Image (cartoon, rainbow, N blue to C red):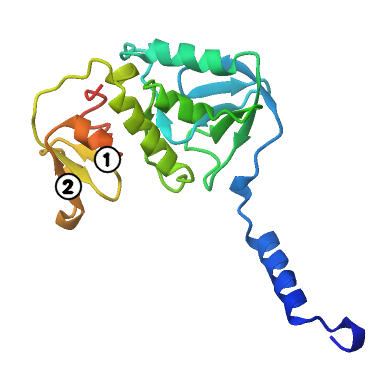
């Protein structure tokens, strides 16, 4: 640039800041326009009026009756609470780095128009578990704290929690915990292993049960 077009150092700094934000501002921070829900499937999945299925990011609610599988404890309570939160209301869906799962469902953080965070409320009420699943980790710390709050206050699934002490092996990378003889758990490198004597302790640290060796037996 020459003459009057030459920018001062402060102007250059502002220009660079604006350009970098335009180029690298993550799209996952931008929420969709308000949409309507057609049907609440369960505590963590809904169908929009346009037919899209939305799976809530960062949480896993107990299952309801499905094909040959019986409902898990608090499965219908989770669905009822989800329905209470969003039924007949407009919602905003915020995406993270991975927008769809391998089933083709949208992956989203769901907010009401008053900015209430639906995913978080389900965990805070004890009607959903925190589910660590990279790369969608934007609200990881908030989910962890919400789960600990629910556990401390014995809400929902934590209300009458009782278990005998036994050994579980956690994987620090995947944040999953396994039975000691689980073929997936035994593949965990020694430096990535962490041992728990109770499932409660594993959940407190943000771990989730292996769906092979435990298969929701933790619930």
Which quadrant of the rendered structure holds the N terminus? Answer: bottom right
Q: Position of residue 3 (x, y in %)?
A: 90, 88
Residue at point 17%, 50% (across, down): 193
Residue 107: % across, % down: 53, 36
Decide: few, some or many residues near mark 1? Use Cα within 10 Å; few <14, some 14-19, many ≥20.
some
Residue located 38% across and 14% down the image = 75
Q: Residue at x 65, y 18 (%)?
A: 89
Q: Are marks 1 and 2 in contact (CB under 8 Å)?
A: yes
Q: Quadrant of residue 114?
A: top right
Left or right? Give the position of 38 relative to 101.
Answer: right
Q: Nearer the viewer, residue 93 or 159?
A: 159
The crowding category of the residue bearing disc 2, from other C-alpha atoms within 10 Å (few below 14, some 14 to 19, many at least 20), is some
Q: Specify the quadrant that holds the C terminus.
A: top left
Q: Nearer the viewer, mark 1 or mark 2?
A: 1
N-terminal of the pair, mark 1 or mark 2, is 2
Query: In the orientation shown, which residue stands out farthest toward the right?
Result: 4
Q: Which residue is mark 1?
A: 205
Q: On residue 194, which mark appears?
A: 2
């Amino acid at each position: 640039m020459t003459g009057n077009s030459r920018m001062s150092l402060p102007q250059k700094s502002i220009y660079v800041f604006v350009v970098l934000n335009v180029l690298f501002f993550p799209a996952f921070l931008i929420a969709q326009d308000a949409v309507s829900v057609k049907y609440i499937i369960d505590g963590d999945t809904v169908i929009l009026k346009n037919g899209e299925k939305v799976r809530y990011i960062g949480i896993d609610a107990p299952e309801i009756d499905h094909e040959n599988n019986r409902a898990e404890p608090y499965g219908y309570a989770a669905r009822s609470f989800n329905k209470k939160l969003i039924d007949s209301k407009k919602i905003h869906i915020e995406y993270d780095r991975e927008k769809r799962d391998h089933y083709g469902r949208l992956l989203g953080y769901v907010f009401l128009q008053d900015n209430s965070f639906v995913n978080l409320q389900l965990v805070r009420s004890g009607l959903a578990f925190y589910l660590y699943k990279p790369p969608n980790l934007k609200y990881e710390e908030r989910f962890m704290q919400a789960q600990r709050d629910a556990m401390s206050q014995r809400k929902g699934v934590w209300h009458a929690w009782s278990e005998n002490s036994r050994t579980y092996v956690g994987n620090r990378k995947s944040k999953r915990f396994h039975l000691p003889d689980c073929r997936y758990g035994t593949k965990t490198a020694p430096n990535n292993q962490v041992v728990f004597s109770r499932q409660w302790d594993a959940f407190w640290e943000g771990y989730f049960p292996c769906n092979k060796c435990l298969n929701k037996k933790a619930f």
